[in-house]
Image (cartoon, grey):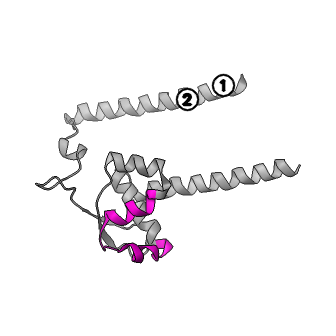
Amino acid sequence: MQLLITTLGKQMNFFLDFFYFEEQGRELNVQEDKMDYVTKEKCLITRDGEGKILPVEIVLESLPEKPMAQMIPLTKGEFQQLITDADLEEELLRTHIVNPSFTEDEFAHIKPSMYGAFKMALLALTTDTSQKEIQDSSTKALLDSIESKKKFTKTKVD
């Protein structure tokens, strides 16, 4: 019962904070007399005249030298496949990197740091978030997993 009350309290605080900031945002919009609406261009993946998805230039932010690459964003269907079938990850990643392009054999020998950088960039491009956010959430998930395994091992031995 205590856990339920604590959880509900935290949710309530979240909603109160959200509404506070939402109200602040409304006041700012009213003061500036400006309201931004989402555009179709923001919602749709850019395609050429034949309907092919156009590549996007993106910085590989996780690498020290921050090089550029050209990548094709994943469609909703491809993104769903990636989430449900981890075996497709390498193929989807390789086929969505346009510049530099890799053969299947070359991609099989790619450095782990480059693989991770391309993967992070493609996920950021597809989900319209920053690579830093993806890196932070991946790091947190990894640390949580390690911590959970430590607790399991400790309780199993005790």
Which quarter of the image is occupied by the N terminus?
A: top right
Residue 112 drawn at (x, y percent): 50, 72
In-front residue for pair 64/157:
157
Q: Is residue 68 above or below residue 20?
A: below
Report if residue 62 is visible in the image: no
**Residue 74 magenta:** no
Residue 77 drawn at (x, y percent): 34, 46
In-front residue for pair 117/75:
75
Report if residue 13 is visible in the image: yes
The stretch in magenta equals: 88-113
Residue 146 drawn at (x, y percent): 68, 56
Secondary structure beneath label 2: helix
What's the residue at 20%, 36% (across, down)?
34
Judge from the rendering whether residue 60 lies leftward or rightward of residue 36; answer left or right.
right
Image quadrant assignment for residue 19: top left
Closer to viewer: mark 2 or mark 1: 1
What's the residue at 66%, 25% (across, down)?
4
Write down the residue under mark 2.
11
Residue 125 drawn at (x, y percent): 34, 56
Secondary structure beneath label 1: helix
What amino acid is at disc 2?
Gln
Report the predominant secondary structure element of the magenta stretch.
Answer: helix
What's the residue at 18%, 42% (across, down)?
40
Write down the residue under mark 1.
4
In-front residue for pair 9/147:
147
Task: Single out the residue that lies furthest toward the left.
Answer: 49
